[in-house]
């Protein structure tokens, strides 16, 4: 994410202005359609997506703009959480603040800390999950730091007052999304907790696909912990489950991901330094 040409490709593919990635605007060239030049349109501006991680070199592409972007995103998340933001921080510090804020809010929601949530209608909670998933896919971590912990709190409140399986399935998916975010942040302890809760909730909801996905996330965490044979067993056992084999094309897709996860070599195997090589 520090190569200028790669960032420009991302901007073009996502139809975002180059300035959203901290890049200088491209040279203005008239767009041609049916052989006739077209004037510029006044498209509405879109919020740039944040990036969690180390910033790296800036290639001379407007570092001030990048720092202001990251600081603004961190300030948005911090204000939503009621967390003060120190002045004069660097881009790396602002990114670290945003990531740490997201992890801290997830931790508190998983531990049942913080204010008691209101219990929204199930339809609203489902729509909120769809938005949270879109935030994750678009790397809108400032919005995710507000929405995902709220989903977990509300989901627990809803399951405590319902005998239906749908709230459990939605809460399981929320925990799976939290697991994916925690794996990205290399927060393994919370990741184990989130993945195990997702598996238990998915079993309660009898959601075969969510159970399989939670097994895949557990395999990822096991591999990160250096437990490569255990990761292999978790992934292959889940892929071979008879209920997953009966789940049609979605089940086949999840089985493929599990087999792919099982086939990921350990570092020793990848470098040819294992005992068998």
Image (spheres, helix red, strand yellow):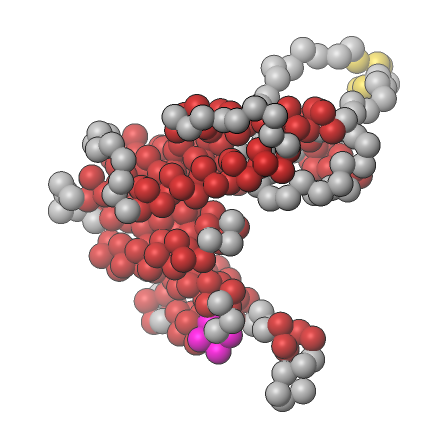
Q: Who's the residue at 63% across and 78% down the image?
A: 269
On-image quarter of the N terminus: top right
Horizontal and vertical percent for residue 117?
A: 23, 32
Horizontal and vertical percent for residue 32?
A: 83, 19
Is 41 included in the stretch rendered in magenta?
A: no
Q: Is residue 234 above or below residue 179?
A: below
Q: Who's the residue at 25% across and 48% down the image?
A: 168
Left or right of 5? Residue 186 is left
Q: Who's the residue at 57% across and 33% down the image?
A: 94
Q: Main secondary structure of the magenta part?
A: helix
Region rendered in magenta: 228-232
Q: Who's the residue at 36% across and 45% down the image?
A: 107
Horizontal and vertical percent for residue 135?
A: 49, 35
Left or right of 44? Residue 219 is left
User: Where is residue 44, by image quadrant?
Assistant: top right
User: Where is residue 60, by image quadrant?
Assistant: top right
Looking at the image, can residue 209 be seen?
Answer: no
């Amino acid at each position: 994410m520090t190569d200028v040409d790669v960032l420009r490709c991302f901007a073009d593919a996502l139809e975002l202005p180059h300035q959203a990635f901290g890049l200088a605007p491209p040279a203005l060239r008239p767009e041609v359609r049916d052989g006739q030049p077209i004037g510029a349109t006044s498209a509405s501006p879109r919020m740039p997506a944040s990036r969690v991680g180390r910033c790296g070199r800036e290639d001379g592409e407007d570092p001030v703009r990048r720092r202001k972007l990251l600081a603004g995103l961190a300030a948005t998340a911090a204000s939503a959480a009621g967390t003060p933001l120190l002045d004069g921080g660097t881009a790396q510090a602002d990114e670290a603040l945003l990531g740490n804020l997201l992890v801290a809010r997830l931790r508190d929601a998983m531990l049942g800390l913080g204010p008691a949530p209101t219990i929204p209608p199930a339809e609203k909670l489902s729509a909120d999950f769809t938005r949270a998933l879109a935030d994750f896919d678009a790397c809108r971590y400032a919005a995710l730091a507000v929405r995902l912990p709220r989903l977990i709190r509300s989901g627990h409140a809803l399951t405590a007052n319902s005998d239906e399986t749908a709230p459990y399935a939605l809460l399981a998916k929320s925990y799976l999304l939290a697991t994916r975010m925690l794996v990205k942040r290399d927060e393994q302890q919370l990741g184990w907790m989130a993945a195990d809760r997702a598996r238990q909730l998915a079993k309660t909801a009898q959601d075969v696909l969510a159970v399989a996905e939670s097994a895949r996330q557990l395999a990822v965490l096991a591999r990160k912990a250096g437990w490569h044979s255990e990761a292999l067993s978790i992934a292959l056992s889940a892929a071979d489950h008879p209920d997953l084999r009966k789940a049609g094309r979605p089940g086949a897709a999840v089985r493929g991901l599990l087999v792919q996860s099982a086939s990921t070599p350990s570092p020793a195997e990848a470098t040819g330094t294992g005992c068998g090589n």
